[in-house]
Image (spheres, coloured by chain):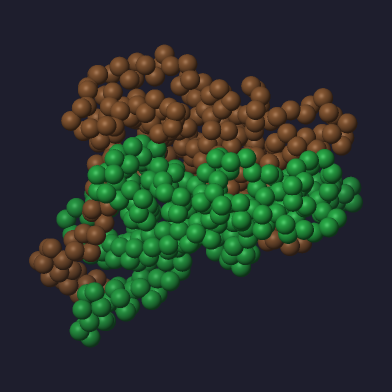
Chain colours: A green, B brown
Amino acid sequence: MKTKKNIIARLFKSIFLAIVLISIIFPLLWMFSLAFRKTGETSLSRFLIFPVNVETGNFTAAIENTMARGYSIPVMFKNSLIITIGSIVITIIIASIAGYAFAKFKFRGRSSIFYSILMGMMIPGQAVLIPIFILTKYMGLINTYFSLILPYVAFGLPISIFIMRGFFIGVSNSMIEAARIDGATEFGILLRIALPVAKPAIATCVIFLFLQNWNEFMLALVLLLKKHLLTIPVGLTKTFGEYITPWGEYSALVFITLIPVIIVYGIFQNWFIKGLTAGSIKG
Amino acid sequence: MNNKWNSFISKLQKNKIYPFLYILPVIPFVLAYFFYPSIFSFILSFTSWTGIKLSKIDFIGIDNFIKLFQDRIFLIALRNTILFVALTIIIQNILGFVYAYLLHYGNMKGSKYWRAIIFFPVVLAPVIVALIWRIILSKEGMINEILGKIGLEALQTTWLGNTVTPIFMVILVNVWQNTGYNMVLFHAGLQTVPDELIEAAKIDGANIFQVIRRVIFPLLTPVITVILVLSIIGGFKVFDIVYALTRGGPANLSEVISTYMFYTAFAVKGPGDYGYASSISIFLTIIIFVLSYLRIRFTREEAGE
């Protein structure tokens, strides 16, 4: 009886692992293998996960051809980095200060202001897309980094304030009070006492914001039109949309954009999983 | 214990402006990117504005909303969105739960790594995921290759180009990307289920399915509610994957609400009708607000408020 159960349990586990391997890793490997095949080999009829001869011709061809069309992978990386990091820095500064105030000060309208900011999480991006496009146009920000940084900050603020406030509520008042008695200024307390202990909360926000802004597509598609300003998701879509790219080069480009993600994820996977589940209150 | 603190707070409150200085930087963002856009979007939905000049806004009453339900493509988009929501929820949650269950109770070696692998697609940009699957689903792609190898050439097709499969491929790709997310949420929920309860049920002779139905599910109700509402809201908002995979094509057959709204307002060869597009987005917003409201109600009830 016992052994029979064990066999069934083992069977289930093996099936589970097989499904995971086949469904998640296999498609990725298959695509990567395309990138390492011979240049110009468009027919994929040879069913090989690992190409017989590893070739890097697709990578050089892909980079040269995209450059020739006015798109550039390094420039896309630069744009994505500037916009993502810029918006994260501004969001974290504003959110930690405001989150601290919501957690530690009592003032009129505290909870109504807090909940109206949280309401922002409910508004779908689609609903504000057209007005934001028009606003950006009238402010003269179209085709600048700020056209994206500012809305990314706005969309990141509600969740970040929520996370920071939640953390600061748990910071003991006696510590803050002691500092006050020692004559620290209010802002000094936030800067020197509250913020240094808030590192885990800030890390959660950074992970969440990083993924949200690095991967954001819809606003970037509407607000950045010049080829030299595109972020990675929009840049790749436009590159493939405008020209017929041979599958080998296509895979090479996708592969290049995936490498940094794979490395960062490999190192910080637990942080990613934690950061994104904390974001599950976002709706 | 709080006397000193309270007296200090009341002193602080005399200086009423002070806390507001901390919140001040948030206000312009909220006004410019939430408050103004929501109102402007609402107003636009009653106009036929094409975005040329602000002085040339013609109000046409509720015509846009009447047009919505006579618009063949919008109805396709609505049907596809509902299909998308329903199927992704069913598949992602069943798979997500099974994965989480096996990770938690399976005594597997390296379950941490399996979890990391299943979760990996979640961190990718939906657009990049769609681009990956565009090759896999292409005419010479992996799926057709496998079908060819196992002698099922008859089933080979252009998965994203025929009249039936594209929306189902969108659903498949979404499931591929997001099942890991549901798994992690279920996994976190399972940590809260006491092992003794399950042991007790097993000693009483319950089989695995009875344990899941009678012991685990009732304890996971809060988690399940959150996951369901999150997936429904996320499903209604889906845009990136559909846009990058099919652009709503062929012939609008895989359009969802968001992509159709985008097409109406911004597509190069589209109508450029900001008014009509706004009414589509207002329709979507109402659905999402109702769902979010339900979610808050549910959460409050569970918290016993």
Q: Nearer the viewer, residue B152 or A271?
A: B152
Residue A150 percent coordinates (x, y): 33, 54
Quadrant (top left, top right, bottom left, bottom right) of the N terminus of chain B: bottom left
Q: In the image, is residue A31 above or below residue A187? A: above
Residue B253 percent coordinates (x, y): 56, 23
Question: Which residue is painted at 53% across and 24% down in the image?
Answer: B252
Q: Nearer the viewer, residue B83 or B202?
A: B83
Name which quarter of the figure residue A106 lies in: bottom left
Q: Nearer the viewer, residue B85 or B150?
A: B150
Question: Which residue is painted at 81% across and 51% down in the image?
Answer: A49
Is residue B126 visible from the viewing direction of this image?
A: no
Looking at the rendered structure, the number of numbered marks drawn on it comes to 0
Name which quarter of the figure residue B137 lies in: top right
Question: Which residue is painted at 43% across and 16% down in the image?
Answer: B71
Is residue A42 visible from the viewing direction of this image?
A: yes
Quadrant (top left, top right, bottom left, bottom right) of the C terminus of chain B: top left
Q: In the image, is residue A185 above or below residue B40? A: below
Q: Is residue B40 shown left or right of residue B87?
A: left
**Which residue is at the far front?**
A68
Question: Which residue is painted at 35% across and 26% down in the image?
Answer: B273
**Which residue is at the far left?**
B14
**Which residue is at the far bottom?**
A182
Residue A148 percent coordinates (x, y): 37, 52
